[in-house]
Image (cartoon, rainbow, N blue to C red):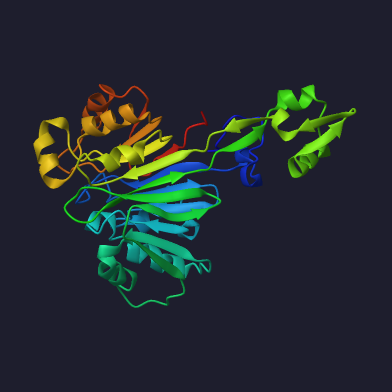
């Protein structure tokens, strides 16, 4: 689904027309700890312009991608929050599938540095014709882990039973042409490109600056929070996110169980979203103790969050919301 933003208008950041690109989340699995008859292990593919960021691929992710119509060749980054099996056992299959499909560009892998030995085992879990250029970039401290045309990807340490990091993707703020202002100054066709390149042009004996016909365009923000109890990093990751994907392992009736094992309830996750100004909240990572509780999760979260609420289902696609 296209990211429509403030169309018509062209985003001047990096020279990209944001009306023609795709930004959406493909949900590959929603179950915590163990898959069920209706939910696969975790797995989330963020399609962000030319990037395919695969977060926490659990067991069966390769097959779920086929069902979802998402190609393994689209994956440009692996982003693991931690090394519990429901968040990483799909790594071998995905890497081997990329090798089979002949992916030649680099694939970057971000994961907690303390689990490096586990990534090595997953990376070489079996014999295969290894052709993928996987570039490991272990995360040891809070901060930036990658930058590019997509923006800035950062990681913050969460509070779980083992070392765990959440991820936050922030697109730089940019500017866009405002059609009404272009029309007011009589600028159209090739002159628009001339103005973008030069910063100013002369029209009818008057100098028109780029700032005269553009408006600011805030960059979009995506946050991914798994397996953690409430902590400062959860709020920092979620701050003003256009989309927050966050675990809701338990319902509020098990709030003490959640705290003990380093997890969140649906109500806690929704309260974070409400306090942080999140626009689209995606709840996932559901305990297998709840076989058919989608409405209970929705009711609990909606009690404290009045934004766009999504109770994740396997194979669903969730578009990143239109720009503010």
Specify whether 285 is left or right of 220. left
In x, y percent, where is residue 58? 29, 55
Whether residue 155 is visible, yes or no, is yes
Specify whether 163 is left or right of 183. left
Residue 289 location, quadrant: top left
Residue 151 position (above or below residue 283): below
Residue occupying the point 43% across, 68% down = 134
Residue occupying the point 40% across, 50% down = 154
How many marks are shown on the rendered structure?
0
Residue occupying the point 19% across, 51% down = 33
Whether residue 312 is visible, yes or no, is no
Residue occupying the point 34% across, 56% down = 61
In x, y percent, where is residue 197? 75, 44
In x, y percent, where is residue 219? 52, 38
Residue 20 location, quadrant: top right
Q: Which residue is situated farthest in the right direction here?
A: 205
In x, y percent, where is residue 141? 32, 56
């Amino acid at each position: 689904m296209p990211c429509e933003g403030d169309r018509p208008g062209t985003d001047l950041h990096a020279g990209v027309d944001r009306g023609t690109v795709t930004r959406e989340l493909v949900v590959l699995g929603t179950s915590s700890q163990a898959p069920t008859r209706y939910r696969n292990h975790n797995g989330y593919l963020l399609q962000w312009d030319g990037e395919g960021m695969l977060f926490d691929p659990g067991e069966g992710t390769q097959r779920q991608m086929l069902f979802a119509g998402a190609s393994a060749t689209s994956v440009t980054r692996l982003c693991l929050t931690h090394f519990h099996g429901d968040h990483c056992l799909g790594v071998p299959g995905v890497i081997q599938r990329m090798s089979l499909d002949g992916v030649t560009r680099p694939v970057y892998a971000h994961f907690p540095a303390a689990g490096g030995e586990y990534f090595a085992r997953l990376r070489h879990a079996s014999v295969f014709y290894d052709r993928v250029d996987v570039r490991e970039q272990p995360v040891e401290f809070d901060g930036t882990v990658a930058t590019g045309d997509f923006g800035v990807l950062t990681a913050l340490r969460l509070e779980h039973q083992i070392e765990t990091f959440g991820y936050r993707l922030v697109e730089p703020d940019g500017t866009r042409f405002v059609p009404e202002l272009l029309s007011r100054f009589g600028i159209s066709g090739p002159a628009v490109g001339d103005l973008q390149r030069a910063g100013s042009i002369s029209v009818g004996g008057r100098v028109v600056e780029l700032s005269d016909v553009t408006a600011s365009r805030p960059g979009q923000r995506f946050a991914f929070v798994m397996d953690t109890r409430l902590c400062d990093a959860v709020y920092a990751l979620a701050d003003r996110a256009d989309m927050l994907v966050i675990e809701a392992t338990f319902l509020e009736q098990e709030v003490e169980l959640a705290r003990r094992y380093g997890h969140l309830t649906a109500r806690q996750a929704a309260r974070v979203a409400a306090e942080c100004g999140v626009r689209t909240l995606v709840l996932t990572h559901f305990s297998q103790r709840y076989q058919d509780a989608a409405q209970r999760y929705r009711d609990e979260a909606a009690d404290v969050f009045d934004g766009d609420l999504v109770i994740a289902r396997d194979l669903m696609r969730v578009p990143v919301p239109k720009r503010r």
